[in-house]
Amino acid sequence: MTVLAIDAGTTGVTALVVSENGQIASKGYEEFAQHFPEPGRVEHNPEDIWQATLSACASALRGTDTTPTCVGITNQRETAVLWDRRTLAAPRRAIVWQDRRTAAICGRLREAGHEPRVSELTGLRLDPYFTATKLTWLAEHDPGTWAGVESGNVAVGTVDSYLIARLTAGARYVTDPSNASRTLLYGLSSGAWEPELCELFGVPEEALPEIVPNYGPLGRTDPAAFLGLELPITGVAGDQQAALFGQTCFDVGDVKCTYGTGSFVLANLGGEIVRSDSGLLTTVAWQTPSGERTFALEGSIFVTGAAVQWLRDGLGLIGTAPESEAVARTVPDSGGVVFVPALTGLGAPHWDPRARGLITGLTRGTTRAHLVRATLEAIAFEVRDVVESMTGGSVPMLKADGGASANDLLMQFQADQLGAAVERPAIQETTALGAAFLAGLGAGVWASRAELRKTWQLGRRFEPGERDDAAYERWRAAVRLAVEGAHGS
């Protein structure tokens, strides 16, 4: 038996066919366009995401002679997608999680005193990152489209809901708790949409999708819509929660970091809702068909791998992202150069949407290698910031995944900075693997989490060496400068 996993990320869609032993039988990938209509704004065309999904899945399926037993989905979270319930066409581009246009709306709600109550209900904070203020913005700035939402003709959802609607030809309009808990509209304690929050953000509760468990029978693909296949959809989760599941972080205290466009550190909290007073988020990790929920503490860092992409595309300092390791190794250190990659504001634990990127310590002797090395160091410093906020100190071990985790120099930096081992799995596609694991549990491909844990294989373990605390303190000072500069102080 095999499972088809769809990972609809921020820059492209990956499709994996995963075998019963947890190995990747075949893979497909398709990028889609990014739209930046104004500074601070990021949009996707939903149809592009759907076409990339079809292309990636067709490619993966061509690489295997088996028909998958079921389908699992994981997705970029928080992105606000609208589509016509009848035709499934999108009336406008989606507003992406990275988009910062709602900073003023967040400020307005904060000044009105709403943030403590919002945080109490959701485990989140008022930040443009989350879905609800994007919907508030649409109601205020795109009344024509919003009229369709209020009339019931236009659906509102995140990328998981949109893909399930497309896969089922409109038969299913659902989301799961891991995605719902990122919207600012879901109550952590109630496990449901909160009428109080819907009223605050101006979102009709009846416009929101049904919340279903993370695995079990969720719908069936329509063969006319999806490559001639009628398959049960039996698993869905937001990308970071899927990565936690794919890393088999099933025990309380297990911690993983996904190094992607941004980096996301999640710690398994078990069944307890633990709230952070140090800038971290409380979120749903997953919910079983019986209703039992597992929670996670999350530190969301907006720009890490994207900073390496900026070195490549924005500055032309490297030809490919993997080249960053070889270039950084040509110098023994960053030469005093410090980079704060706040290219879309600062996430955890600082949460400042107005902060902007900053490079300090430049001299006549600075080379591209110093800047590249400073970028890799910044990623490790950002993750150390979050882990120390999360644990009050260090962590016994960190499981690492995502594209940038292939960088051995970065992983060694990370182990050094954490003073803890970093383990990288043999299969680094853990987000898609998590979707496959959830779907396989939902369809009976695997009988238990214990069975899934046996499939996890270590790729490499990085032991901590000497820690450069002086470099970390220079980094912290630069972060303070970035924040002060954004606020004119």
Image (tube, rainbow, N blue to C red):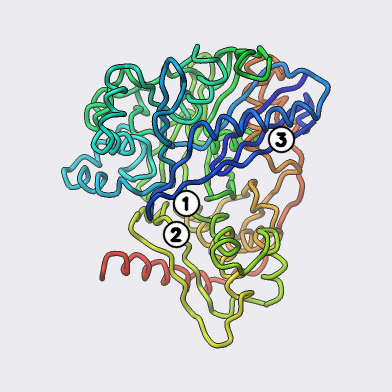
Image point 70% across, 63% down: which residue?
323
The percent coordinates of residue 233 (x first, y second) are 60, 17
Name the residue nearer the viewer: 393 or 306. 306
Give the amino acid type for the residue marked by disc 1 in the picture.
Phe
Give the amino acid type for the residue marked by disc 3 in the picture.
Gly
- Assess disc 2: are there few (<14), some (14-19) or many (≥20) residues with their C-alpha within 10 Å of its C-alpha: some
The percent coordinates of residue 318 (x first, y second) are 65, 66
Q: How many marks?
A: 3
Q: Earlier in the sequence, mark 2 or mark 1?
A: 1
The percent coordinates of residue 132 (x first, y second) are 33, 34
| Nearer to us: label 1 or label 3 | 3
| Nearer to us: label 3 or label 2 | 3
Q: Earlier in the sequence, mark 3 or mark 2?
A: 3
The percent coordinates of residue 55 (x first, y second) are 66, 31
Q: Are marks 3 and 2 in contact (CB under 8 Å)?
A: no
State how far apart marks 3 and 2 are (Cα).
Answer: 30 Å
In-image side of 37 versus 396 (left or right) = left
Quadrant of the rendering where the N terminus is positioned:
top right
Q: Are marks 1 and 3 in contact (CB under 8 Å)?
A: no
Q: Which mark is residue 28?
A: 3
Which residue is situated farthest in the right direction here?
A: 65
Looking at the rendered structure, the secondary structure element under dot 2 is loop
State how far apart marks 1 and 3 are (Cα).
Answer: 26 Å
Which residue is situated farthest in the left direction here?
A: 112
Q: Earlier in the sequence, mark 1 or mark 3?
A: 3
Q: Which residue is mark 2?
A: 343
> Which quadrant of the structure image shows residue 276?
top left
Image point 51% across, 37% down: which residue?
76
Looking at the rendered structure, the secondary structure element under dot 1 is loop
Q: Which residue is mark 1?
A: 302
- Assess disc 1: are there few (<14), some (14-19) or many (≥20) residues with their C-alpha within 10 Å of its C-alpha: many
Q: Are marks 2 and 1 in contact (CB under 8 Å)?
A: yes
